[in-house]
Image (spheres, rainbow, N blue to C red):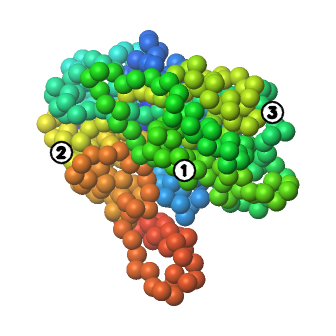
Amino acid sequence: MQKIGQTRVLIIGAGLAGSEAAMYLANNGVSVVLVEGKTLKLNPAQKIPTFAELVCTNSLKSLDPYSAHGLLKTEMKSLGSFIIESAEKNAVPAGDALAVDREKFSAEITEQLKAHKNIRIVELEADDPIKLKAQFECDYVIVATGPLTSKALEVWITKEVSGDDFYFYDAIAPVVDADTLDLSKMYFKDRHKEMTEGGDYLNSPMTKEQYYAFIEELKNAEKVPAKDFEDWKFFESCLPIDLMAERGPDTARFSCMKRVGLEPDINGKWPFAVVQLRKENLLGSAYNLVGFQTRLTYKEQVRVFRMIPGLEEASFIHLGSCHRNSFLNARKLLETDLRSKKYPELYFAGQITGVEGYTESAAMGLYVAFGLLRRIKGQEPVNFPVETAIGALVNYIMTIEKPCPSNINFGLIPSIEFTKEMKKTGGKKLKKELVARRAQEVFQSFTSSLR
């Protein structure tokens, strides 16, 4: 058993997972060396030099404790999640979702990490984690470089750990200036909520003719091509809107452009499809287009997205883009606690392990730090029950035969016996609530047994 105060952990990457792991270990008395290279050079997807930047959207998804995302947040808060606490402090209105002011969220996390007495920040583009571990006289190293691992470190991981199959693609949605929107063609309302005055989401309804004309332009618009040596490989739950259009004319209408949970217009006529916009900040001076990740060139984005009612004269603060993600085959390469099978003192955390999403990435940082702290204390390793959200995520990446990044969803959590009577009473909603209640009980029992 090592003494906590004499143990030093190197963490490479100050994104969501790295920031979460760093604060958890530091708060528990462990010395942390946090290495981050974005202050020296931003990668193509990054916009700000501060830590824990949210590059795709500003939403950490649902807060509903009976949803899969809400369940994961509940578990993380129980473990003392730094990321969830910071998100709640910097939240912007988003219905039952947890969305944040990106810059304030990132700035607060950076400030707190830099101010912590047990954390040393090093501005450096990492290459060989084993070499850096020795250089900074650390006992363990956590690689939490996320989906945008630098080229030098990617080369090392590919050579020493993963082999050749080490990438995926993700996409970013555009952001518009609120002052350039025509609100006479739009209305505020949250999905699945009784209509009261206003709402957190700005909705742009489309007629059948408008929708199909828009889809046709998405299909025909010029797109940024993949490089010769790469294929487009996207997360299924974060598909570019133009790829949805290519899959079929109605794909988007049953995805991010669905009218479900909204309302008819003043004449009682339902829209055929709806585009939703969500606030980027508390001032409401900017909105992002929900679900509108895209491969379109910048020029085509402006042209095509101005077809959306209310966006005819829109000014775009940020345009969308695609970027290459990096992730491991955890089942093949990592132990259950996410340490390398080849290098026992080397851990991986965050999206690089094969999870998808902001909260999921942070959760894996928390999970790795939790397990590493037990190891430092000389305690036996533990497996989170698969009935819990964290346990289900870990079980997924450690058992799926063909790696495919996934966010948290009820399909990952063991189901429950559901009688005909229960189906009549509450249907799928009741079933999810019962699974969530069981997860909460199992998680509380599990964490209580460790005290």
Q: Which quadrant holds the N terminus?
A: top left
Look at 38% across and 48% down and name the residue there: 406
Could you classify mark 1 by the number of other residues whose Cα lies within 10 Å: few (under 14), some (14-19), or many (20 or more)?
some
| Rendered location of residue 29, percent (x, y) | 40, 37
Residue highlighted by disc 1:
250
Q: Which quadrant holds the C terminus?
A: bottom left
Looking at the rendered structure, the kind of residue marked 3 is: Asp
Classify 436 as above or below 181.
below
Closer to the chain start, of discs 2 and 1, is 1
| Rendered location of residue 13, percent (x, y) | 39, 27
User: Which of label 3 and label 2 is nearer to you?
Assistant: 3
Looking at the rendered structure, the kind of residue marked 1 is: Asp
Residue highlighted by disc 3:
182
Task: Pick the residue in front: 350 or 450.
Answer: 350
User: Which of label 2 and label 1 is nearer to you?
Assistant: 1
**Distance (Cα) linking label 3 and label 1:** 26 Å
Can you tell which mark lies on residue 332?
2
Task: Pick the residue in front: 284 or 211.
Answer: 211
**Distance (Cα) linking label 2 and label 1:** 38 Å
Q: Is residue 415 visible?
A: yes
**In the figure, residue 178 lies in which quadrant?**
top right
Look at 53% across and 27% down and name the residue there: 221
Classify 435 as above or below 74.
below
Is disc 3 placed on a helix, strand or loop? loop
Could you classify mark 2 by the number of other residues whose Cα lies within 10 Å: few (under 14), some (14-19), or many (20 or more)?
some
**Distance (Cα) linking label 3 and label 2:** 52 Å
User: Which of label 3 and label 1 is nearer to you?
Assistant: 1
Look at 15% across and 41% down and name the residue there: 341
Closer to the chain start, of discs 3 and 2, is 3
